[in-house]
Image (spheres, rainbow, N blue to C red):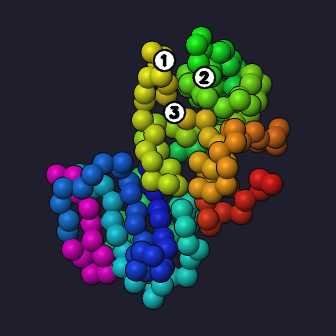
Amino acid sequence: MVCIFYNKNTMNDTMTINLVPENFTRIENVKQGTLLYNEDKFIGMNIFDVSKFIEIEEGYLYLNKKIADFVLNKFNIDLVDFHTKKFIVGEVTKADPIENSHLKKCIVDIGSELLQIVCGADNVEKGKKVVVALNNTVMPNGKVIIPTRMMGIESSGMICSRKELWNFGENSGILILDDSYEKGKEFIEHYANVKKNIK
């Protein structure tokens, strides 16, 4: 599950690549960077002086061919092997109020399976297309989505708001997608190196 962050100024021209949402216990220094391990498991890397080798957008980045080729050529690591969908277009099939709370127990169809997600947004309704962050997804603000229980109800994944996807603005309800989005497809418009089609 490749998560890529790059900011030339605040991160000292370093690109951080997380492959697994785990803490590192060991660092291996290599030319132009470091490889991160949890015990013997390779979980990510830091690449230094990135702007000397590649011109890329800054922010939370989607793994495209340009980045994949750069890492493969520089470090002989194929990031494509680690890439899985993280943000999926889903359709809310149920949104039942949870007694004594502002929350709703939602069933969301993401094409391959039905997820039960507890959501507190006022605008979550049956029939709406939404963006779902799957478990173990690293959000743009660094938060990792994990299975949880709310009001005693199991929740798997998260229905995303604009603020959670773009890391700015007000957290005023979930993002509702139009019918041009296909259930089960990956949602990528929030990455800095992908054009945003959401107005």
Q: Is residue 174 magenta?
A: no
For label 1, the SS is loop
Which is nearer the N-term, disc 2 or disc 3?
Answer: 2
For this view, does 10 lie left or right of residue 103?
left
Image quarter where the C terminus lies is bottom right
The answer to whether residue 88 is above or below residue 156 is below
What range is drawn magenta here?
29-40
Residue at numbered disc 3: 157
Dot 2, crowdedness within 10 Å: few (<14), some or many (≥20)? some
Q: Is residue 31 magenta?
A: yes
Q: Residue drawn 38% across and 54% down?
A: 19
Q: Residue drawn 45% across and 53% down?
A: 142
For this view, does 119 lie left or right of residue 82?
right
Residue 107 shows in this picture: no
Query: Separation of disc 2 and disc 3 at Cα?
Result: 15 Å
Residue at numbered disc 1: 151
The chief SS type of the magenta part is strand
Query: Separation of disc 1 and disc 2 at Cα?
Result: 9 Å
Which is nearer the N-term, disc 1 or disc 2?
Answer: 2
Check disc 3 and give the amino acid type.
Gly
Q: As rendered, which of 177 and 55 lies closer to the eye?
A: 177
Check disc 2 and give the amino acid type.
Leu
Check disc 1 and give the amino acid type.
Met
Q: As rendered, which of 82 and 100 lies closer to the eye?
A: 100
Q: Position of residue 168 (x, y in %)?
A: 63, 57
Query: Separation of disc 3 and disc 1 at Cα?
Result: 16 Å
Residue at numbered disc 2: 103
Pointers 1 and 2 in contact (CB under 8 A)?
yes
Q: Residue drawn 36% across and 79% down?
A: 48
